[in-house]
Image (cartoon, helix red, strand yellow):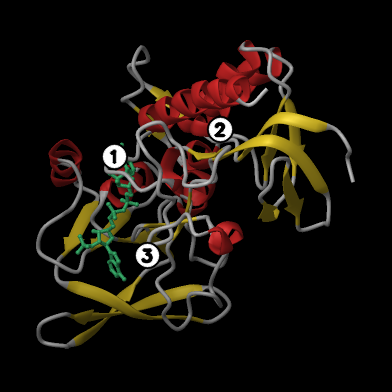
């Protein structure tokens, strides 16, 4: 066990966590970030970013790197680790999968979300053999091949446009006859000659041999089935919050998102949450960064009030 007592430990190094770290460190707090995967969070998996104010166009990995560079320049302590439990108390304990315990006066949870799985036969078998949840990571493997994207939200449509740079054809399969994505990105897919839209269908099985070959689609109205030849499958059907490690704390809603007030406070004193993991309407890099800044300011006030 590390006996040091931090002022603040931030769980998750996406835009919310890194923004919180910048504000906290600039206020001279003893702050550490614990991250389970790699710094950047969802940004790492995002191809184009065109709505970060001040940068007309950048890529997710570039923005992630520049934020990580920023926290490093401030000497924020960074620890790789997967948090399995939080124990509340005046001094809070954070316990990781590998049984490390960290002590802290306050916590900001900024763990974000994970891609939802389709849950159909073949999905696990062909994961990494045609099924991928990250176009930026795997798109180039499908040069001149046919790929299929499932979902009609912003993620699905933006990633479909990215995949069309490599693939010969990109099918987008949606279960309704309307998209959920913003109008602008809908226009872009309508104007992309490589993109083929299949309405009112859901995938029910993924088939292949050593690699994925076909997706069985079912018409949601007629229940008629068809086999769609495809080398790749990219499900982008939404996200689930990463909050399994706080299930026992009673701070989540029915969907698992963390309930916070406008100051990012949970119902537990000294425990804050920020970014995509909280219950809110708009999940963007800019809103996550804003949440992180608010949470850090509140932590500064909390520590001051509880000196
Ligand atoms: P989303 O907006 O929830 O869209 C999910 C899509 O998947 C919907 O079209 C949904 O269909 C479909 N779907 C859900 N479950 C399905 C299933 N079992 N089988 C087939 N289709 C299914 O998810 P997202 O695109 O990942 O976006 C998540 C959040 O991040 C949103 O708030 C989004 O605006 C935000 N985001 C923003 C940007 C940006 O602004 N540039 C980029 C990416 C993400 P229905 O519509 O029929 O429910």
Residue 303: x percent and y percent?
Answer: 62, 24
Q: Which quadrant would the C terminus be assigned to in this image?
A: top right
The residue sitting at the front extreme is 306
Q: Which mark is residue 282?
A: 1
Nearer to the camera, 55 or 16 = 16
As drawn, 206 above or below 160: below
Residue 216, how many percent across, how many down?
A: 32, 81
C-alpha distance separating marks 1 and 3? 18 Å
**Residue 44 locus on image (x, y percent):** 53, 38
Residue 187, visible in the rendered structure: yes
Q: Residue 207 falls in which quadrant of the image?
A: bottom left
The part of the image, by quadrant, that contains residue 104 is top right
Side (left or right) of 192 relative to 29: left
Report crowding for label 1: few under 14, some 14 to 19, many 20 or more residues within 10 A (C-alpha): few
Question: As drawn, is 297 to the left or to the right of 102?
Answer: left
Residue at image mark 3: 254
| Upstream in sequence: badge 2 or badge 1 | 2
Q: Earlier in the sequence, mark 2 or mark 3?
A: 2
SS label for mark 1: loop
The secondary structure type at the circle numbered 2 is helix
Q: Is residue 66 visible?
A: no
**Neighbour tally class for label 3: few under 14, some 14-19, many 20 plus, Cα within 10 Å:** few
Residue at image coords 61%, 19%: 304
Label 2, label 3: how far apart the Cα atoms are: 24 Å
């Amino acid at each position: 066990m590390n006996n040091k007592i931090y002022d603040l430990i931030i769980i998750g190094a996406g835009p919310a966590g890194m923004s919180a770290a910048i504000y906290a460190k600039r206020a001279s707090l003893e702050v550490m970030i614990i991250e389970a995967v790699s710094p950047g969070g969802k940004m790492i998996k995002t191809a184009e970013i065109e709505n970060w104010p001040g940068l007309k166009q950048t890529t997710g990995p570039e923005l992630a790197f520049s934020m990580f560079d920023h926290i490093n320049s401030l000497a924020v302590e960074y620890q790789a680790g997967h948090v399995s439990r939080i124990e509340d108390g005046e001094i809070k304990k954070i316990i990781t999968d590998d049984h490390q315990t960290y002590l802290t006066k306050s916590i900001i949870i900024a763990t974000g979300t994970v891609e939802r799985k389709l849950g159909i036969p073949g999905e696990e078998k062909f994961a990494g053999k045609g099924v991928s949840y990250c176009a930026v990571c795997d798109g180039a493997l499908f040069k001149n091949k046919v790929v299929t994207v499932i979902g009609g939200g912003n993620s699905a449509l933006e990633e479909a446009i990215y995949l069309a740079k490599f693939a010969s054809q990109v099918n987008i399969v949606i279960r309704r006859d309307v998209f959920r994505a913003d109008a602008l990105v809908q226009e872009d897919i309508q104007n992309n000659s490589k993109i083929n839209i299949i309405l009112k269908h859901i995938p029910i099985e993924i088939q292949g041999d050593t690699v994925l070959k076909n997706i069985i689609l079912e018409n949601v109205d007629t229940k008629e089935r068809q086999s769609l030849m495809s080398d790749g499958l990219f499900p982008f059907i939404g996200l689930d919050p990463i909050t399994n490690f706080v299930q026992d704390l009673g701070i989540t809603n029915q969907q698992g998102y963390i309930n916070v007030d406008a100051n990012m406070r949970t119902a537990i004193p000294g425990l804050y949450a920020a970014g995509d993991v909280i219950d809110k309407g708009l999940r963007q890099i800019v809103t996550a960064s804003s949440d992180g800044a608010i949470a850090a300011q509140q932590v500064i006030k909390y520590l001051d009030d509880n000196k």
